[in-house]
Amino acid sequence: MENKTVRLYFIDAMRAWAILMMLQGHFVDGLLDNAFRDTGSLGFNIWKYFRGVTAPVFFTVSGFIFTYLLVRGDKKGFENPRVQKGIKRGLQLLFIGYLLRTNIFGLLNGQIYPSFYLVDVLHCIGFSLIGIVGIYLLTYNKRNFWFPLVLVLTTFILFILEPVYKQWSYAFLPEIMANYLTKTNGSVFTVIPWFGYTTVGAFVSLIFTRHKNAKLLYPIAITVSALIGLSLIFLSSDLFRSLYQLTGLQLFASVYGNNYLFIRLGDVFLVFAIFMIFRRFMTNRTILGIGQSTLTIYVVHYIILYGSFTGLGLYYFLNHSLSPAVVIPGAVVFMAVCTYLSLKYEKNKATIKANMATGLQFLWNQAEPWVFFTLKLFRTYLQRARLAVLRLIGLEGN
């Protein structure tokens, strides 16, 4: 029991770290003046590198937590209540992802702007959760090794074949579907290869779950995670170069030329090792609350920064216009505001939802007579129009 509790604590702390890194990353990247993006600056390069770690960590941890809950109970297959909850959660994330990209002014003008169809992190995580459920349902009634094996093979295949499928245009698909597979139209993330990070997180979760009572769980897990992480960061590129020299396959040369997926996976394993080392110090209620409120924080930050529903966010007014002297303290304030509002919402969620339901019921009670009157009037005019058409074509008697 103790292992399970501590493990969830350090995972929630990782989620908190990742969401805070995302907040400052989006703020700085969106508002920092291009004149200050100096690739020769050590400070800028450090910030840029760690910003690139955020998304892989977030996807991996999402897969870890979801799969941990999926396999925790005794029920299997379709009888597992987490299957239905997982599909529902995935669809909810897809819905919220599109909702945040909705522009009310465009709808009032009878338009859906092209940005509505673009795919972002919520779309990919939602699809990934449904994908993990699919793999689980295909393998739950087979031998125990099939589920983790398919998960880790999915990661490997998506990562190793990335140079191949990233060149495809997917022109045969409708744009709303193609955006899940290519960044050509402006999508920020795509399901492939990012699904690979959630599946490797799911794989790690299964390892933890099956060995949760081992006395040396954390010493072994920390050591293995550190070794895997360092190997992927410093040795994986040389491995693919050697494979290319040995086999002559261009695929290995392409991976060697842009080996960001495996290197970032190494970063993720190092982050796992670091958070496991300091797991006993990660029980602060605020940190855990942030880690458990990542969806709310994401929604709040998206509305403030990018102006969901109106397009009037900080990005609209301050796009690439601030100096580091302004953007750095601004990022700190932005993180504080987003987390404060989100935690306040989570704390009072039941009351807020109850008040919203009461308000909507009141509005419906006021509008109900007018709605039924309008429908009745519309039905009357529709019947008259029908009779007029029948008279015109001479079929009134029939």
Image (spheres, grey):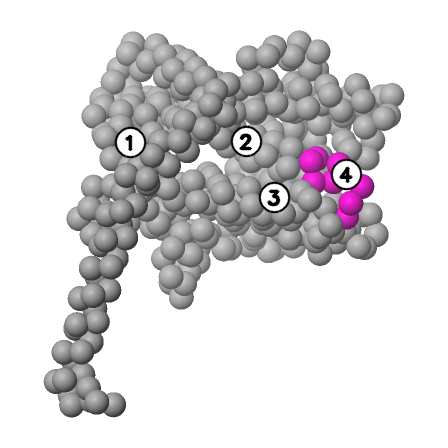
Tell me which numbered mark, 3 or 1, is placed earlier along the sequence: 3
Q: Position of residue 358 (x, y in %)?
A: 39, 31
Asked if the magenta segment contains residue 70, the reply would be yes
Q: Nearer the viewer, mark 3 or mark 1?
A: 3
Q: Main secondary structure of the magenta part?
A: loop
Graded by Cα atoms within 10 Å as few (under 14), some (14 to 19) or many (20 or more), the crowding at tag 4 reads few
- Circle 3 sits on which residue? 86
Q: Position of residue 236 (x, y in %)?
A: 63, 37
- Circle 2 sits on which residue? 58
- The secondary structure type at the circle numbered 4 is loop
What's the residue type where badge 4 is placed?
Gly
Q: Which residues are magenta?
A: 68-76
Tell me which numbered mark, 2 or 3, is placed earlier along the sequence: 2
Q: Position of residue 14 (x, y in %)?
A: 59, 22
Q: CA distance from mark 2 to mark 1?
A: 23 Å
Q: Position of residue 46 (x, y in %)?
A: 46, 19
> Which residue lies at the image location 35% right of the left edge and 21% below the top edge?
28
Q: Quadrant of the N terminus?
A: top right
- The secondary structure type at the circle numbered 2 is helix
- Circle 1 sits on which residue? 307
Left-right relation of 82 to 117: right
Q: Nearer the viewer, mark 4 or mark 2?
A: 4
What's the residue type where badge 3 is placed?
Gly
- Circle 4 sits on which residue? 73
Front position in the image: 45 or 147: 147
